[in-house]
Image (spheres, coloured by chain):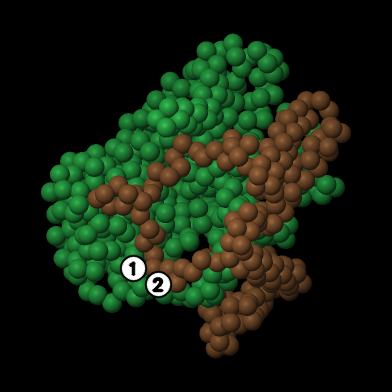
Amino acid sequence: MYEAAVPALMSMLAWPAPLYLVLGTLLGMLFGILPGLGGPQVLALLLPITYGMNVDLAIVLLVGAMSSIAFGGSIPAILINTPGTGQSAATCFDGFPLAQQGKAGMAIGAAATASCLGAIFGAIILTIILPIGRLVVLAFSYPEYFMLALMGLSVIAVVSRGSLWKGLIAACLGLMISTMGYDPVTGSVRFTFGSDYLWDGIRLLPAFIGLFAVGEALDLFLKPGKIAQIDYRGRIGGVTEGMKAVFRHFGLFLRCSVIGTIVGIVPGVGGAVSNFLAYGHAVQSSKNPEDFGKGDIRGVIAPEAGNDAKDGGALVPTLLFGIPGSLEMAVFLGALILLGLEPGPRMMIDNPEVVLVLIYTLVAGNILVSLIGLFGAGFLVKITYVPTGLLAPVIFMLALMGAYLANGLLADVIVALVFGVLAFAMKRFDFSRLAVVIAIVLGDLAQKTFHQTLMLWGYKGFFSRPVSLGLFIIIVAMVLVPYVREMLLSRKASRVA
Amino acid sequence: MSNRKDKKQTIFRDAIVFDVIIMAFFLVLTIMSLNYNPRARSIPLGLGIVGATMMFFQFLVDALPRVRSKLRFVSQSGILAGESQFQPGLGKPREEPVTAPDQTVLSYQEKMKSRALEWWRLLRVILWLSGFIVLLSLTDYLIAVGAFIVLATRLEAKETWKRSILLGIFVNVGFYILFEVLLKAQF
């Protein structure tokens, strides 16, 4: 993989790649700043634009956008106590009090530096771990890929913060949707309802646009008023003080970056968890925890390091196994598939240059967004004062025209609308959209490898191979753990009583 | 008396409707899968049965609150439930950072009314978007986009005509540059 290092760097620096990097970074930052919108939405809206683009340029645009979401979300968290994304929520705790004390610049300086260095840390770990893909390829065949797909789905449902039952239902729903259309393994056409359009099944692009962009726009449109409740009018100065603070607390920064990377590697956990875990660690490891929540700069450094390091970690299961680690990664995985790439252990062998372009862009995007944030935070936060009634219709049009752009089919627009309504309803009733998305993405792989295993080895193929059997045991254990834990806790409680 | 009644009746009919729709989806596809050859139907049949059964239990829990205590496994949370609830420095649950409007406690009837209004608004937005799709099929995309932006922001979002028309022009110009000039899209 490393022999492609220089060609990949040349690809990233050759014009017009830098232009796409800047565009992607600015767009990602914009979506990160706006609460209610984030990585999945910006990626879903960029998908149709990258259709037919050169692969390297498409990767630069998409990863540039993805890399700037986390820090973008921190800006309103610090200035107006409203996190732009869930992964910046913990930054509010100390970031906003700092802004109230007139130290907004210090907070933004610390956030920008911790974000940038955290992302670089995550990218380094990613670069070290990815070559393991070569070893994985030799050990994996159809049963192992099937079990991996099943494990990806189970993990999402089990580690979700909502109802486990609803998470599993959502996974079943996504898998069911993925069975629609022509199946090349069995030669059957399923659930087309007499429509030629559905011969190809539900297309990823309009489904993603609907699930993320249209669904969120519906939510925004139904909440009248402005997104921001607070109007920030202070000065932003003292930025270098914040930058130096990261190096003063470098041990904390490193530990939180490790936390973020590990959280990112676990599929389904997501940025919000890394943000809170890192903040919690900072509080618990401090000699004076009572200072947190009142404007302690460590309360900004810790979550920012965690939520940016997680990007590098989240790319590990996404690229190595084709199992997306979060909603963003699920859309990104869809983008890679649409670009003709096949995420999984073979990616490192077949497309090492693409993987390295991705890593370089992750680093470059974070450096760029930190620089933009340092100089433009005060101006950019004004976007949150735009009424939702003006913002939501624009997002609707961008989303639906994006769905139309790919194939010029009205059916794609209708699918996007249907999935948008589904996403809205799922959000209202606490069903996991992440489980649905990952099931749609992994459904094809799961079905193909299921049938291929049956054809070659029959049902015992899943249980006679040690890696496949081991993965199956892990899946069963994972699904049962919450119930067993609940049982043990209630027994303990009744003994105490 | 009305508080006891409210507490008993925490049944949100919209959740039940959603459960029924999803359950029907699973059942319809399960029945359709019986028409396919054995290999083709194996996965959708299995998924459909499992999905419909799970959704049925969810429906029972949503429709009959008394059943909730008997079907506790349906309400089981994931491993990370509740991990993000703590207060800085003290490890206790923390309130939402965003300043919310006056938090008066709503009665069951008020909650139902508010949810019904929300679904009614959603239906109106869906009708607006459907109108956009119809217009898109009949005219140029710039006309459809402009019309939607102007009319939806004025009539649905209650913005002024000036703002709506300015936004419509701005979006149309932006779309023209993005789709026709930069992407050279063929619609």
The three-letter code of the residue at mark 1 reads Ile
Q: What's the residue at 55%, 21% (across, down)?
A: A472
| Location of residue A124 with respect to A40 vertically, above or below | above
Residue A309 percent coordinates (x, y) = 32, 43
Q: Secondary structure at mark 2?
A: loop
Instruction: Judge the density around disc 1: few (<14), some (14-19), many (≥20) Cα neighbours within 10 Å.
Output: many
Residue type (three-letter) at the residue carrying disc 2: Gln
Kindly indicate whether the residue at mark 2 contacts the one at mark 1 (C-beta within 8 angstroms): yes
Picture coordinates of residue A395 (x, y %)?
55, 66
Which numbered disc, 1 or 2, marks the residue that appears first in the sequence? 1
Q: Which mark is residue B112?
A: none
**Residue A386: percent from left, percent from top:** 45, 75
Residue holding disc 2: A229
In the figure, the shade used to draw chain A is green
Q: Quadrant of the C terminus of chain A?
A: top left
> In the rendered view, would you say B147 is above or below A308?
below
Q: Chain of mark 1?
A: A
The image quadrant of residue A353 is: top left
Mark-to-mark CA distance, 1 and 2: 8 Å
The residue indicated by pointer 1 is A80
The reply, left or right, for residue A210 in relation to residue A380 is: right
Q: Nearer the viewer, residue A190 or A231?
A: A231
> Which residue does the image show at 15% across and 60% down from the upper left?
A240
The quarter of the displayed image where residue A412 is located: bottom right
Of all residues, the one furthest to the front in this rendering is: B1
Q: Residue at x 36, y 30 (%)?
A: A129
